[in-house]
Image (spheres, rainbow, N blue to C red):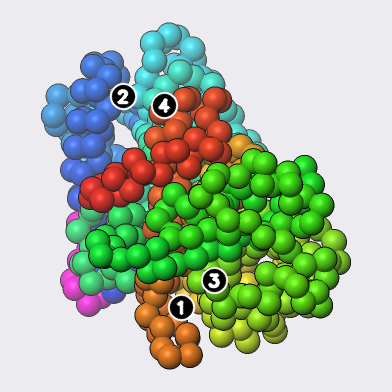
């Protein structure tokens, strides 16, 4: 499913109208019937709700959409009370006025709000829970919010209502998910035509609840394509299906995991186990001399072990045998110091294959210092930072990145010619072909030490299996396979986390339980609907 910003949405609407002869009124009519279908089938019937539905009406086309939905609900026998928030305003859009008129004729109960107390006392007097449709502000919202709407939104948020936002929760900006003082906290958001970037960023993600997209009849040619999409099974494809029954262990590659300083060998072990459990043929974990026995004492018998050189010039080291490996993961528990930096740089310069750069390996690098090395590297480099690591790497503050994650992601991908997975409750994947994928699956059970190490291992394990089409000098020919393998890794990690949370609960699940459920995750990924 494509995701758009406001300019892209406006362009789609413009082309649909100018070139296809579609009209704004037709869109609003489609919102009306599709929105009413969803609310009736998935909310009113599920809750067995027969009370009054409250509609909050602003003055733009978002309000027109909400009124069209409500008119259809009334026509199907439900009761709707509409609070017209700006009744004496001569700036209401033409479509809004048309829809107010239609709503009245169809029997929507209209309350013209002269004073916010009217709405407040309605909510106070009726102690029942409500269903509220929020059609105050959509993509036309501009910060800041007035005192009047501030009080209204607080009143709605403090009620026990099930709230359905039309297009985007009111008070959230549709591009970057920003809010001023307060925004409607929705349980469901009905995205018109396509989801917007603001549904997945920062406050937007916190306020949107479950985002469902209403097909309002835009031509397919206009709503497909684009550079941003949700990570779904059709994106992941079926790269994992292509295993050869007659293969031997070398067919499935050898992953080297480099990390684990004293006290932190668990990170290296979890990454190694993650690699092992996605079907890589061989895994070697390499650590510093000081932590070698700690590592060997804790690792699985399937995992081979080795030493990181004490300096990049140390000849008796794994770095000098790099051609034995098909993919490298560097960083989990590695430690942040000059020697680590030397090793990371050496590995990126010398290894002729994909490198997953995680955790401490990201911390020792720096965008302005290292972009040239990264950009000129001939083989795939995949960074897996969380928001803090990403910000530090770029030199920006976490707040700056949080507000415009997609812009930052695209810029950094461009400057390094590397793939980036910006991890968080909603992860953003950026690829050098300009594509961005949004993996929206908040699971607080994944906010546990080691879940990032597991992801890095999964990616290293998948990339070692050589799903990639290389020419004779090992250069990757078809980057699509690379991007698909990365999407598969992120998808498998997410689904395994979902299954682990179901089994153990979000409190008791750990990073190891993600690894444990990779097998179920691959089975689920084989089915069509992954999330
Ligand atoms: N996706 C599509 O192609 C379509 C989407 N549609 C729906 O239309 C809205 C966008 O409608 P628009 O009329 O452009 O804007 P809004 O309804 O969001 O709101 C505009 C009005 O709100 C006022 N406003 C803006 N900021 C504030 C604020 N901080 N406080 C108070 N009022 C505010 C604004 O006033 P101005 O003075 O700034 O003009 C407007 O009066 C979209 O979200 C979809 O729901 C259509 O169905 C068509 C196709
Ligand atoms: K809204």
Q: Is residue 465 left or right of residue 427?
A: left
The reply to whether residue 230 is in sight is no
Q: Earlier in the sequence, mark 1 or mark 4?
A: 1
Marks 3/1: CA–CA distance: 26 Å
Residue under label 1, please give it.
433
Q: Is residue 50 magenta?
A: no
Residue under label 4, please give it.
503
Q: Residue furthest right?
A: 338
Mark 3 residue element: loop
Residue under label 3, please give it.
325
Which of the 4 image quarters holds residue 6?
bottom left
Q: For the point 44% across and 46% down, which residue is it? A: 494
Q: Position of residue 7 (x, y in %)?
A: 45, 68
- On screen, residue 360 above or below 432: above
Q: Position of residue 222 (x, y in %)?
A: 27, 70
Q: Earlier in the sequence, mark 1 or mark 2?
A: 2
The one nearer the camera, 483 or 37, is 483
**Residues in magenta?**
17-26
Marks 1/2: CA–CA distance: 46 Å
Q: Earlier in the sequence, mark 2 or mark 4?
A: 2
- On screen, residue 237 above or below 123: below
Q: For the point 51% across and 50% down, which residue is it? A: 302
Which dot, 2 or 3, sits closer to the camera? 3
Q: Earlier in the sequence, mark 4 or mark 3?
A: 3
Which of the 4 image quarters holds residue 502?
top left
């Amino acid at each position: 499913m494509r995701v758009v910003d406001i300019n892209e949405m406006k362009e789609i609407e413009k082309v649909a109208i100018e070139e296809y002869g579609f009209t704004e009124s037709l869109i609003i009519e489609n919102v009306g019937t599709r929105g009413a279908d969803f609310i009736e089938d998935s909310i009113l019937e599920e809750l067995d709700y027969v009370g009054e539905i409250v509609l909050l009406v602003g003055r733009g086309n978002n309000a027109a959409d909400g009124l069209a939905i409500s008119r259809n609900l009334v026509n199907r026998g439900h009761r709707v009370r509409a609070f017209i928030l700006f009744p004496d305003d001569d700036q209401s859009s033409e479509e809004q006025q048309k829809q107010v008129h239609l709503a009245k004729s169809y029997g929507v109960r209209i309350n013209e709000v002269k004073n916010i107390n009217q709405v407040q006392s309605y909510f106070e007097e009726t102690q029942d829970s409500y269903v509220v449709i929020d059609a105050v502000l959509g993509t036309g919202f501009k910060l800041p919010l007035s005192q009047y709407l501030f009080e209204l939104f607080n009143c709605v948020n403090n009620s026990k209502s099930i709230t359905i936002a039309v297009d985007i929760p009111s008070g959230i900006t549709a591009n970057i998910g920003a809010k001023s003082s307060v925004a409607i906290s929705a349980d469901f958001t009905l995205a018109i035509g396509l989801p917007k970037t603001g549904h997945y960023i920062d406050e937007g993600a916190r306020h949107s609840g479950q985002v469902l997209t209403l097909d309002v009849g835009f031509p397919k040619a206009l709503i497909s394509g684009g550079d941003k999409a949700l990570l779904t099974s059709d994106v992941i494809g079926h790269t994992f299906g292509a295993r050869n029954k007659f293969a031997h262990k070398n067919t499935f590659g050898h992953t080297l995991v480099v990390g684990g300083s004293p006290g932190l060998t668990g990170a290296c072990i979890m990454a190694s186990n993650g690699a092992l459990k996605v079907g890589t043929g061989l895994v070697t974990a390499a650590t510093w001399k000081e932590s070698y026995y700690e590592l060997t004492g804790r690792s699985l018998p399937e995992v081979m072990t080795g030493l990181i050189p004490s300096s990049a010039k140390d000849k008796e080291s794994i770095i000098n045998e790099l051609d034995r490996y098909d993919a490298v993961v560097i960083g989990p528990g590695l430690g942040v110091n000059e020697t680590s930096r030397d090793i990371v740089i050496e590995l990126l310069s010398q290894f002729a294959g994909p490198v997953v750069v995680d955790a401490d390996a990201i911390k020792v690098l720096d965008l302005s210092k290292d972009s040239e090395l990264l950009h000129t590297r001939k083989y795939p480099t995949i960074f897996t930072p969380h928001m803090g690591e990403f910000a530090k790497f770029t030199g920006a503050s976490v707040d700056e990145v949080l507000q415009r994650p997609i812009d930052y992601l695209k810029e950094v991908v461009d400057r390094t010619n590397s793939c980036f997975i910006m991890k968080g409750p909603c992860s953003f994947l950026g690829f050098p072909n300009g594509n961005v994928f949004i993996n929206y699956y908040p699971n607080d059970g994944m906010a546990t030490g080691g879940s990032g190490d597991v992801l890095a291992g999964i990616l290293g394990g998948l990339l070692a299996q050589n799903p990639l089409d290389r020419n004779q000098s090992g250069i990757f020919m078809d980057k699509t396979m690379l991007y698909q393998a990365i999407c598969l890794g992120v998808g498998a990690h997410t689904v395994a986390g979902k299954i682990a949370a179901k089994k153990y609960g979000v409190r008791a699940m750990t990073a190891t339980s993600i690894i444990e459920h990779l097998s179920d995750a691959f089975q689920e990924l084989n089915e069509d609907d992954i999330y």
